[in-house]
Image (cartoon, helix red, strand yellow):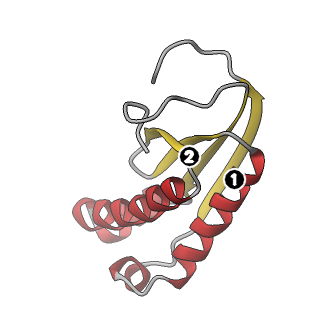
Amino acid sequence: MSPERIALPEGTVTVLSIDHVDSTVLNQRLGDAAATAVERELVALADAEVDRHHGVSLKDTGDGIMAAFQSAHRAVACAQEIQRAIATTTSRSRSLCRPSRSAAISSAARCWSRRW
């Protein structure tokens, strides 16, 4: 869900950051257009899981995402499902590479007052 459609979580917020490991190597191996297509497909999988786990997408980094959740449980469950979705996909990205993602999760009291 985009910040424009839903209010950002109040109180303690858990931020999940997902990044494609070795995206530069993928780009060198496949070329810019093919690597971008693979990365877009993987980001789409991640975005779908963020929505399913009631998260708020904060940022699309091109080869990853940053999302906020109202609980650490939702963020961890989302990260696990993203990894499962990538591991089981039979799409073009699976045939071109063995996609790997790194995930970082951090919880803190919300300290921003504007939408991203």
Question: Mark 1: few, some, or many residues within 10 Å (few <14, many ≥20)?
Answer: some
Q: Residue at x 45, y 34 (%)?
A: 6
The single residue placed furthest to the left in the displayed view is 33
Who comes first in sequence, dot 1 or dot 2?
Answer: 2
Instruction: Please give the name of the residue rendered at 45% of the width and 61% of the height, measured from the top-left corner.
Output: 48
Residue 67, image quadrant = top right
Residue under the image location 45 percent in, 55 percent down:
47
87 w.r.t. 112: above or below: below
The part of the image, by quadrant, that contains residue 112 is: top right
Quarter of the picture holding the N terminus: top left
Q: CA distance from mark 1 to mark 2?
A: 8 Å
Q: Residue at x 65, y 59 (%)?
A: 79
Q: Is residue 78 left or right of residue 108?
A: left
Marking on residue 19: none
Amino acid on which the number 2 mark rests in the picture? Gly
> Who is closer to the viewer here, 97 or 86?
86
* Residue, disc 1: 74
Q: Position of residue 91 (x, y in %)?
A: 37, 83
Q: Is residue 34 left or right of residue 94?
A: left
Residue 75's x, y, as percent? 68, 51
Quadrant position of the C terminus in the picture: top left
Residue 103 at x, y percent in the picture:
66, 53
Question: Mark 1: which secondary structure?
Answer: helix
Proximity of marks 1 and 2: CB atoms separated by less than 8 Å: yes
For disc 2, the marked residue is 55
* CA neighbours of label 2 inside 10 A, class few (<14), some (14 to 19), many (20+): many
Relative vertical location of residue 91 with respect to residue 70 in this rendering, above or below: below
Q: Is residue 75 above or below residue 80?
A: above
Q: Is residue 18 left or right of residue 40?
A: right
Q: Position of residue 17 (x, y in %)?
A: 60, 45
Helix, strand or loop at mark 2? loop
